[in-house]
Image: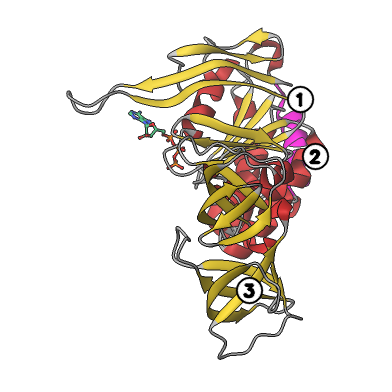
């Protein structure tokens, strides 16, 4: 089912009398396509959870509308929206078995939807199979790993076949290995069920790896929506460029003069057709090509970190905004441990220019 957000806005009153109100979500407009997995991404406090709570009905919007398909659900309570919810803390009932936990939402069905014990059991078994828990139905939550507990929570959210599945940081409580495994599981379950899913995370790598589309938010405002690779390759502004990618993009003070890009005294790249202006220059770590003789950009060598197939060259530059430049280059490049400088040429498609004031891409 598609989900339409129309001018969606949520303001919270200030916690003290003098303070300004908080605009947690500011005029969010988007149509989430049917059957897709959407990653809602941004730093802490950017309004991700509030957006999810508005979609689920746990919060009511200050302004704007929410549609599931063509139905306006803005004023419907959560239980009438048909959403499945999964939170960071699995919130399972500790005294119930896996099966009882999964069945729980079915027991509250009323009227024509009421199910027999046998039908509920069948449904629980089917859903448990989907999340690969079918051998563990008699266990209590404390007898399960974190990843398994989260799968019970997902099964419980799916058992009523929700129109929309909403996941708020569902992997945060898992250790690194389980996190990786469970996110792949999540992707598989979403593909198999085809339920439109919105997944909140502050972890850009997690969102990029499993989402069909990512939405990048900051301070309640949506900064960019797109396929993960497209957003990485074509960031709309400096914030998005800095938020996506590990190591982070390197940012320099720069200037376009006579169709050349200058960083400090050096013209590091030809930029045909560009008008003269001062810019922020963002260079992805993979955008540097070491060239000891003809490299147009000279940096002060700090150290080389071995990563296996690649090496990370850590260097500095007076026009750099952060502490040090991180460039990832093939391990086939050889560096002298005593060299004072390192010279690079730049891959033009890995270099982004941003307006100095608005920080929008130019
Ligand atoms: N009930 C509330 N009353 C007042 N302010 C709130 C309330 N809930 C959230 N906020 C504020 O709204 C903003 C957005 O909060 P929200 O929880 O949506 O962010 P988030 O992106 O999910 O953050 P995190 O990743 O830390 O959970 C924050 O500034 C937060 O302090």
**Residue 272 percent across, percent down from the top left:** 72, 45
Q: Where ligand 1 lies, by image quadrant?
A: top left
In-front residue for pair 70/239? 239
Which mark sits nearer the N-terminus, 1 or 3? Answer: 1
* Residue 103 visible to an observer of this rendering: no
Magenta stretch mostly in which secondary structure? helix
User: Circle 2 sits in a helix, a strand or a loop, which is it?
Assistant: helix
Which mark sits nearer the N-terminus, 2 or 1? Answer: 1
Please state which of the two labelled residues, at mark 2 or mark 1, is closer to the viewer.
Answer: 1
Q: In the image, is residue 290 above or below residue 185?
A: below
According to the picture, the residue beneath numbered tag 1 turns out to be 34
**Residue 119 percent across, percent down from the top left:** 76, 29
Task: Tell me the distance, in whole angstroms, between the alpha carbons under discs 1 and 3.
Answer: 49 Å
According to the picture, the residue beneath numbered tag 3 turns out to be 343
According to the picture, the residue beneath numbered tag 2 turns out to be 191
- Residue range (magenta): 115-131
Q: Is residue 121 magenta?
A: yes
């Amino acid at each position: 089912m598609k989900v339409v957000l129309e001018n969606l806005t949520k303001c919270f009153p200030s916690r003290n009398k003098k303070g300004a109100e908080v605009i947690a979500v500011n005029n969010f407009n988007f149509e989430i396509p049917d059957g897709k997995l959407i990653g809602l991404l941004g730093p802490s406090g950017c309004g991700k959870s509030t957006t999810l709570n508005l979609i689920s009905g746990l919060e009511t919007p200050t302004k704007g509308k929410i549609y599931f398909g063509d139905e306006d659900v803005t004023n419907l309570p959560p239980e009438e929206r048909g959403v499945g919810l999964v939170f960071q803390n699995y919130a399972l009932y500790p005294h119930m078995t896996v099966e009882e936990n999964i069945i729980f939402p079915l027991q509250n069905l009323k009227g024509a939807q009421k199910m027999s014990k046998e039908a509920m059991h069948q449904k629980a078994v089917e859903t448990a199979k989907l999340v690969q828990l079918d051998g563990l139905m008699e266990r209590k939550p404390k007898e399960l790993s974190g990843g398994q507990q989260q799968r019970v929570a997902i099964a419980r959210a799916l058992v009523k076949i929700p129109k929309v599945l909403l996941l708020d940081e569902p992997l945060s409580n898992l250790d690194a290995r389980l996190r990786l495994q469970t996110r792949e599981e999540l992707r598989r379950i979403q593909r198999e069920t085809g339920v439109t899913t919105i997944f909140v995370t502050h972890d850009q790598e997690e969102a990029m790896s499993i989402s069909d589309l990512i939405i990048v938010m900051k301070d309640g405002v949506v900064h960019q929506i797109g396929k993960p690779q497209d957003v990485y390759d074509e960031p709309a502004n400096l914030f998005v460029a800095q938020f996506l990618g590990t190591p982070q993009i390197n940012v320099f003070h720069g200037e376009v003069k006579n169709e050349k890009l200058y960083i400090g005294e050096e013209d590091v790249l030809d930029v045909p057709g560009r008008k003269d202006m001062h810019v922020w220059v963002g260079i992805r770590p993979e955008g540097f090509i070491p060239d000891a003789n003809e490299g147009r950009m000279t940096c002060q060598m700090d150290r080389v970190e071995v990563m296996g197939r690649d090496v990370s060259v850590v260097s500095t530059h007076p026009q750099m905004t952060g502490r040090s430049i991180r460039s990832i280059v093939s391990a086939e490049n050889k560096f002298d441990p005593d060299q004072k400088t390192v010279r690079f040429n730049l891959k033009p498609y890995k270099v982004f220019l941003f307006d100095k004031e608005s920080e929008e891409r130019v």
